[in-house]
Image (cartoon, coloured by chain):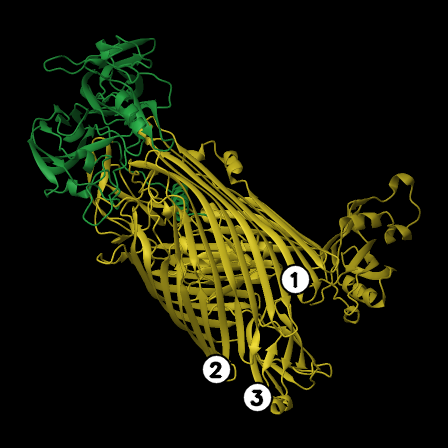
Amino acid sequence: MTVRARSISTSMAIVAALAMLAPRAAVAQPKAPPAAAPKLTRAPKLASFVEAPYPAAERASGKTATVVLQIAILATGTVDRATISESGGPAFDAAAVAAAQRFVFEPAEIDGKPAPVKILYRYEFTLKPEAPTTGVFDGVVRSRKKKTPLAGVTVQLDSGQRATTDAAGHFHVDAVAPGKHALTLEGEKLTAQRTEETFEAGKRLDVTYDVEEREEAAKEGDGDDLEIVITAPPIRKQVVSTEVSAEQGRRVPGAQGDVLRVVENLPGVARSTVGSGALVVWGASPEDTRVYVDGVRVPRLYHDGGLRSVVHSDLVKSVELAPGGYGALYGRGLGGLVTVALDPLEDKGFHGSIAADVLDAAGSVRASIGERVHVEVAARKSYLDALLPVFTSRDVSSLFPVPRYADGQARVVYRPDPRTTFEVGGLASSDATDRSTPSADPAARKTESTTLRWGRVYARVRRENEDGSAITVTPWFGADASSRVSRFGGTPAELTDDSTLFGLRASWRGKPVAGVVVTAGLDAEVVSSSIHRAGSVTSPPREGDARVFGQAPSDRVNADTWSAVVAGVAPFAEADVSLLNDRVHVIPGLRFDPYVISGSRRTPVEGATPSVGYFTSEALFEPRVAVTADLSARVKVKAAYGRYHQTPQAEDLSAVFGNPGITAARADHFLAGALFRLTDTIGVETTVFYTTSTDLAARSDSPAPLLAEALEQTGSGRSFGAQILVRKEIGAGLFGWISYSLLRSERRDRDDAAWRLFDFDQTHVLTALASYRIGAGFEVGARARVATGFPRTPVRGAYYDARTDTFEPVLGAPSSIRIPAFFALDLRVSKRFAIGSSELEVYLDVQNATNRQNPEELVYTRDYTQQSAITGLPILPSLGARFAW
Amino acid sequence: VVSGAFQRATLAAITASSLLAGCTPELDDRGFQITGPRLLAIAATPAEAEPKAAVTFRALYVDAQGERGKGDLAWAFCTARKPLTEQGTVSSACVRESGPDLAALGSGPAISGALPDDGCRLFGPDRPAPVDGEPVGRAVDPDPSGGFYQPVRLRVSDGGVFTAIGAARLACGISGATPEQSVDFVKRYRHNENPAIATLAIARAGSSLLIAPDAPGADAGATVARGETVMLRAAWDACPTAPACGDGVCGAEEDVMGCEADCKTPKGCAGSEQYVWFDPEARVVSLRREAIRVAWFSTAGALATDSSGLAEDEAASAHTDNAWTAPDAAGEARIWLVVRDDRGGVGWQSYRVRVE
């Protein structure tokens, strides 16, 4: 908290004061005839304002005070004198007078000539908190056994800041730089102990350290002396992951204030094609990366087009991306893991925000009801589809589908006591696009409509026990409805999927023995899907299909309607074993993930023959292990291994379009890395990784595939590479990072095939971004991105299909050429206006500021004799505003 | 659950949208212009036949002077079934220079031969012969009209080498239906008839001038002014939409017992025919109408569109229009019209127009 004086000088106040004016010049003159009475022709105007400091003596009170001054202004505009008209208290009066006497005005004019006047001026003092840049560390150190406070224990942070506990065992450290800090506890009766805490700007971290005194340990003779027990031990981050707070995420250039869009900029994430928003992490398919919002799985992180995330930023506390090698708490995905942590909702009072830009409008409100209940509601709705016709008379839907999206969230948190939290909430999202391409040629007419609506409701109970353990139980229920209906000439393509989902995550976390933090629980998920699909087996294309952009889908069509239930109940356990005085952590984990699949149809429909269902089950073990070691206070090394499985997509279980016999695919992640903390706010993290995947579903390459085996589980993949992240945490108004990933991701559809590049392989991905608060509420930021182009299959020639009157390409080696490299510079400038205790932020986000013509896709003429490239978005400025209170 | 296919489809759609929102390059992609040797169409006669039946394939191979008599046109049946890993309309083995899956038919602008006897197993609804120890294979999926096709490879050597694929529609029946539906289908289905351009007319304000088809030794079929833009109307036969004995067409609801005149030797209609098909989604046998497409070509001037036509769900009519702007220079322009129906039927007609 800092103190700032606020002054309000309004023209209204001056005008009101003018009614009381008695210009000194006039007073000194004899009475003039009425017709010659002097007339104020120009009011004085404050040209130079001097801000009065909030009196130091009143800081503790923090009260608001108003001082009304009478200011005598000379004909030159300088202040002759300032006197108190209404007192706000001695200290405020003195500060106001001192400041006012340094004011400079544009002089008033009477009858067109500069003249001295007196005005009344109201000076308001308010105590306004500045945007904090540091956190506060508060805590109590107690005897573990007696639960009595321990005095004289020194708590020292790696930044050098320290505090000693008082008689009540309490300690306090101000101005702690955000980020993770190592700390030690030392005292006469203690052996120095180390642990870590993470601090956030503007937030207070309250901890209770229950430590064993030397005497206690000696008496017990267990040899495990003086172990720190942290009440409710924090959940350890994944060994390799990047976490970004909402505060930082909101300020990232190019993200237009959307916190979750920061994920696109993290190491290990490929740059997706402009506007697609697909998350390609460490060379895994987008559908292989799982997204959780506080333990509730959601189908996607972004709305169509990647323009916005599906969760309002005001709800988000932080987002973490683990590209691989994550622990046993999560599974069912071969790729990365995105976990969104919601704000704990502890604010008192009524707060909220409204925001709007060219894409959409959003709002949120949160309120506390009494001391124990908190409510938060947020919503967003796009209007780009309605806005475009204002600017263009063209039917843009004939060119591209304008995304239409909306989302909403609601939460109620009840804390009957400080250790218990109940929460119920819901998430909902809707996306829709429509596109039509008219043509005089029936075969060239194209229409496409997509919708995706999903919702989740959840309940969560969290209880922190006296012994430091915590239990969290989160049951959730959801529904997904997706639909895609298109027609390419006379060839239909339809896919609808209606699913209901039930999930349960329950976990216990605690320290059963000294030096070991155990997390154990259950992760259950049941998905019941009803699917209808019609069209070509080869449309939409799968990863690895040899094709070119714009190629017409095959006109061989079929249809199928089927249902499938995929259920898994996975108990898991993970232990964080602290060794060598907490310098080394060994984290073994095991996840037992049995699953069952029940399908409605094993073979395609054949006349009136009743369908025969099927049942598949498999018991899977997923060992995970991670090791971290602090080589010094600033250097940490790490390594991890994990095995992962992913049950088949229900869509792949079609007897016509897929294979009902498909089972889970498997992946193994190996990684190692090091973290170097160069300064208190700058860190460098490097990671090398190698992943393999097997049993991937791939198209049958047989000229005569077996019945109900359009897909075969013969695919495999491998990815390897390295990533580096140089990150500057928020400090002195500046934050940013540089991330670079060097990777290669390959696939092959069967063992005897040659490795080919993965469709989303990008050799180099470099992202550099920074944001800096330059003062006066202004903030500037920039983001630069460089990325290798995606692989493509070259066209070596073409043949003419006279039946369909189309040319078909003759293709070369799969994925043997690439789209040219991408570069873009995005800029952001914002200005924050303080309005009382509220804030208005206006920002301009400029994407592709250099207007570089980035090739995004290779295209060909109808007969494939000419090749060119479609370029991405030109320079795209976006103006927006956000008002928060 | 948001399936991978949905994600992929949405991704593709959004990608396309985003790309289009960016900048689509201008490529010289006007297919109507005939400036050199070019294959415009391949037709099979009859348009639809059972395996082993004799079929004649004809190629419309032209240049700016008319149908081109030069070049070696080598024909071969392709017997390779397209794997699901390939996106094209036929197996990549069909477009190779040679191979075990290519059965040579001969050379020339037209060639006749008997359709392979295993066409319905290779390219139709009959399941492939089981391999020892393995379950039965997957039948080929039909096209949207319910059709299956025997591909024929045409290799044109005329300075360079150009490959084209033609097809004959196979009369193979349907798969996946009940016996009753199969019987109903066989009873009511009529083989496809190649469509034909009946007339081409120049539509001017208040009048319509028929253009005489091109014929050896004949004058140009019409005359237009240099630079003049005229509306061309291509028409095909209007096919009956309701059974009427004596109309010359044996419809789906007619048979030899009820209308011997039309059905003793079943004859189709050279326009937008009605036909029965097995709907794989609704799993019923129902009646529908062919869409008709006309591809337009000219040796001079400019056409507004490369192709036009009538979709199945559009109001029934028997014509389609296109605007043609005559060249600025006097001379003679050739115009070809290739008409295709939904069931693989092909027909064409050529015209000459004098520009003065």
Q: Colour of chain A?
A: yellow
Report x, y in % for residue B289.
32, 22
Among the chains pictured, the one given green colouring is B
Disc 1 target residue: A421
Q: Amino acid at mark 2?
A: Ser
Q: Percent position (x, y) of residue B336?
A: 20, 22
Q: Nearer the viewer, residue B249 or B43?
A: B249
> Dot 2: within a 10 Å radius of its alpha carbon, few (fewer than 14), some, or many (20 or more) residues?
few
* Circle number at residue A632: 2
Quarter in which the C terminus of chain A is drawn: bottom right
Depth check: A28 or A332 in front?
A332
Disc 3 is placed on an element classified as: loop
Q: CA distance from mark 2 to mark 1?
A: 38 Å
To which quarter of the image does residue B137 belong? top left
Left or right relative to B92: residue A181? right
Q: Same chain for the residues at labels 2 and 1, yes or no?
A: yes
* Element assignment for label 1: strand
As drawn, the label of residue A222 is: 3
Image coords of residue A221 (percent x, y):
58, 91
Q: Quadrant of the N terminus of chain A?
A: bottom right
Q: Visible in this render: residue A36? A: yes
Which comes before the other along the chain, label 3 or label 2?
Answer: 3
Question: Closer to the N terminus: mark 2 or mark 1?
Answer: 1
The answer to whether any part of residue A824 appears in the image is: no
Residue at left 10%, top 13%?
A: B217
